[in-house]
Amino acid sequence: MLWSLGMFVIFAVPGYLLAVTKMDRIGHRRLQFIGFSIMAACFVVLAIVPALTQHVAPFLAILGLSYFFIQFGPNMTTFVLPSEVFPVSMRTTGHGVAAGVGKLGAFVGVFLVPVLQDHIGLRGLLGVAGASAVLGFAITSLLPEPAGRTLEDVSADPLLAAGHISSVVASPNPTLQEVRPPTA
């Protein structure tokens, strides 16, 4: 427990604080790419180099580096991106669904990780984590970059419009909004 607290204070908190200060400058998608890349590299290295899982110091150093980039990347951006990439007309619903899927994944992980570790061992589990980070990187490439753009501009992004998601255009009455299909 003390190790976990130490890892959190040394690696996670600085990663989170740095992400808060640099996210708009680096870009939300780019920050997520960086985080997933370093996470994948750390987990794959831990999975393929047996000595690293047998000695505490190098294991904690590499795991700590991954923990830093979890915060300075996907953990921070998963709070922000859903509230920016969904069209205005369905932003709260999309953000809620994204948060719900994340919670479901965490719930399933609590039960699945021990079972996987029993069957494939720690190094196998680290390989699965590395593969998951690669998958997260790939999925991130499907998202538009919202940094430096208005929420309305992001909603009108051609990547979103290609999915036939309607965009919202303000009507003359500021309290009402008219939903129009995206234009080609």
Image (cartoon, helix red, strand yellow):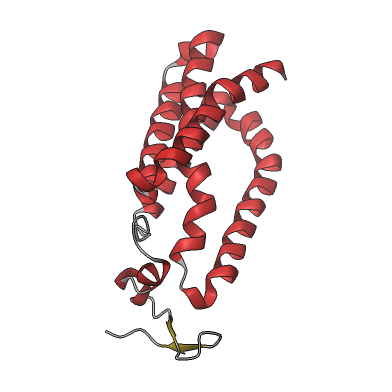
Give the residue at x 39% y 53%: 140
Q: Position of 118 compared to 43: left or right?
A: right
Side (left or right) of 107 relative to 150:
right
Camera-side residue: 104 or 20?
A: 20
For this rendering, which residue is in front, 93 or 173? 173
Find residue 155 and report its image quarter: bottom left
In percent of width and height, residue 116 lies at 62, 35
Q: Is residue 1 left or right of residue 55?
A: right
Q: Quadrant of residue 122?
A: top right
Residue drawn at the location 51% of the way across and 44% of the way down: 76
169 in relation to 145, above or below: below
Quadrant into which the C terminus falls: bottom left
Most foreground residue, 166 or 140: 166
Task: State whether residue 144 is above or below residue 130.
Answer: below
Work out which residue is located at the far left of the displayed protein and give it: 184
Q: Nearer the viewer, residue 53 or 70?
A: 70
Q: Position of residue 162 (x, y in %)?
A: 33, 76
Determine whether 153 is above or below 82 in the image: below
- Tell whether 181 sits left or right of 6: left
- Residue at position x 47%, y 14% in the image: 52
Question: Can residue 70 be seen by looking at this rendering?
Answer: no
Tag count: 0
- Tell me residue 106's x, y (percent): 65, 46
Quadrant where the image shows the N terminus: top right
- Who's the residue at 51% across and 50% down the image? 78
Residue 10 in picture, x, y percent from top left: 55, 20
Q: Is residue 77 visible?
A: yes
